[in-house]
Image: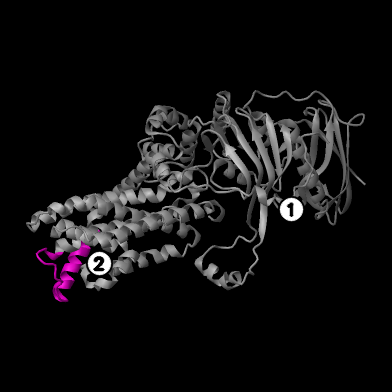
Amino acid sequence: MSSFLSTAEPPSTPPPSLRYRHRYRIWALAAAAWGARALIRTLAEREIRVRYKQAVLGFAWAVVTPLVLMVAFTAFFRKAGRIDTGPVPYPLFSFVGLIPWTFFSTSVAQGGLSLISNVPLLNKVYCPREVFPMASVCVAGIDSLVASVVLGLLFARFGFAPRATTVWVPVILAVQVAYTLGVTLVASVVVVYLRDLRHALPLVLQMGLFVTPVAFPLGIVPANLQRAYVALNPLAAVIDGYRRTVLYGQPPAMGLLAVAAAASLVMLLGGYAIFKRLEAGIADVA
Amino acid sequence: MSPSGSITATHVWKRFHADRRRRLLRDQLQTLPARLHGGGRRGWRWALRDVQLVAEPGEAIGLIGSNGSGKSTLLKILTGVMYPHTGQVDVAGRIGALIEVRAGIHPDLTGRENIQLYGALLGLGRRQIRERFDDIVGFAELEDAVERQVKHYSTGMQMRLGFAVAAFLEPDVLLVDEVLAVGDASFQQRCLDRMRAVLAQGTTLVFVSHDLAAVEATCARGVWLQQGVVRADGPVRKVVSAYRQSIESAAESAAHLQGEVGLLKLELDGPDGSPRTQGPLEVAMVLTSGRQRACRLYLGVSEGTATPIFLIRRDLDLPAGELEIRCEISRLPLPRGRFYLWAGVFEGGNRDVLPWQPVAPFDVIGPSADHGPQGVVCLAPLHVEASWDTARR
């Protein structure tokens, strides 16, 4: 036997001391996003281009969903008893809630399927996998921008101007994006393991519309339960915050916003940890 | 920090579920009680066991082995798509994977948009893609089609597009998995040329293929994986020939020389022992059949793979009983080396009455074959003069 041949049989099990360890740190999320910004941009562009090419209405779809829901809510509550929105016209009130809600539900619905629909690619080419759900969130963000333009038109239609407290919007937006990204990351990776969930996802999102104060004000939840409610559903504080600052000229409810911010941060960091842990096995199960 | 282009993989182990169960929620719920009670033992199958692969920058390694030996798993671990169970993997520098990439191509986008997307996936910046754009389009021969939607492309055009992007990535480490299995002959040759050009730039190459001739032509070092274990690691010709011998002996033990027609005896003779290059080779065989039948006998010679170098055939009128057949190949067009004689008897077109199989090894004495330049794959289609003689026994 010459030296290049090896006839030695390896041990039946690997030495536990050499076990491969996955290394990930929490700040790596930001680093990965920054390092792959060109890729995220290209993926988001792809998604938008494809939608634009396939659909006659193209970008109009970004506003069709919130507009239709707004009209439906308005018609429904005109019949079923008015909701007291003070000096604010109800269509504006609901549309301001629908923009962050649509951002969330589009992100989770599209981002949730972003890994599973790219599995053949993930099995062949290495790239940080966070970029797929992140790109979906970006696309939903662009939809929100388009919807915001429509919101501007609605303001003009109702002769209503945003209040000076609108300067709070970036803070609230940060909470909204953190929570949405955290949920989207978890949804995308869990769906790869539990394929059934891709059918459950739209249903869960539909239910979410009714347990989030989109059509109604946060005030209908008893005051002593609001903190617990917002901890479970930070979007409630986000929507309430937008309404207070943009429509009513009040500062956001600080206590509630702080609870929502903490819950969103936990969701984002925990979601990223779950994502990284499960992502390591995608190529094994898919 | 190891120099870019080097590969260090030590004590790599990887396991998969032995039962490839579906991972649906339904299945998970069904097995939940068993798993909660600590039972529900899972069967694992080791796909890689204690694999070492250490490469210097610029080395060209051919990874060979039969199906299921762990080649693609190892490549996926090197790419970073899959993680090992145990061990250390460090691939320094940018990794390019030259693989079948239609997965990443979106049918509704144009060729140009897809090149940008795929380049970004492989880690290229926008400017780098723009710089290489013309080269990529030229290599893929898509000048006329680049502004068209990819869904109007042919399959071959889509594949060329994917390869071209990967081939112009200019990586430090290039991983190639069976690219030559697709594409027409001229594109395969250009893929090999491109690989050679990339090698000349000092890129490290790991090349997985069942095409042993292509591996020998491209790589200097061979690594043979068998059931997840490195069986041989050394000069490519030695490793490939060790691998060939193992498939041959496996094929030999699996051979069944008895179909509806049996092969009773087979002798191979040169004029004095082993046949010589350009010398005569005499094959003597005895076939037995239960009834009279008109059929066709094929003989072939291979170098170990299932693809014969040449074939010869003879229409036979097999009587009930035994028939002795002699065949003399007057000038054997084979270089020095070990070859296999294959035989098969077919009736009425394609129905095998003696299955096509390797029946005997033989060694040829003579000058060794000339090797082509690196990157040129030699397949040798040969025309062989032969005379036949049959005699009833």
Q: Residue at left 54%, top 51%? A: A283
Q: What is the number of callouts on the image?
A: 2
Residue that carries the numbered disc 2 in the rendered image: A213
Identify which residue, B127 or B116, lies in the foreground.
Answer: B127
> How would you classify the magenta stretch by its main secondary structure?
helix
Identify which residue, B129 or B35, lies in the foreground.
Answer: B35
Does dot 2 land on a helix, a strand or a loop? loop
- Where residue A255 appears, x then y in whole percent? 26, 62
Residue B7 as seen in the image, left or right of residue A270? right
Residue type for callout 2: Pro
User: Do the residues at discs 2 and 1 belong to one chain?
Assistant: yes
Specify the subunit that label 2 lies on.
A
What's the distance in space between the residues labelled 2 and 1, CA to CA? 58 Å
> For the N terminus of chain B, which image quadrant?
top right
Is residue A73 placed above or below B180 in the rendered structure?
below
Residue type for callout 1: Ser
Q: Earlier in the sequence, mark 2 or mark 1?
A: 1
The quadrant holding residue B379 is top right
Identify which residue, A272 or A171, lies in the foreground.
Answer: A171
| Residue at the left extreme of this rendering | A159
Say whether residue A69 is magenta.
Answer: yes
Residue that carries the numbered disc 1 in the rendered image: A12
- Where residue B229 appears, x then y in whole percent? 71, 45
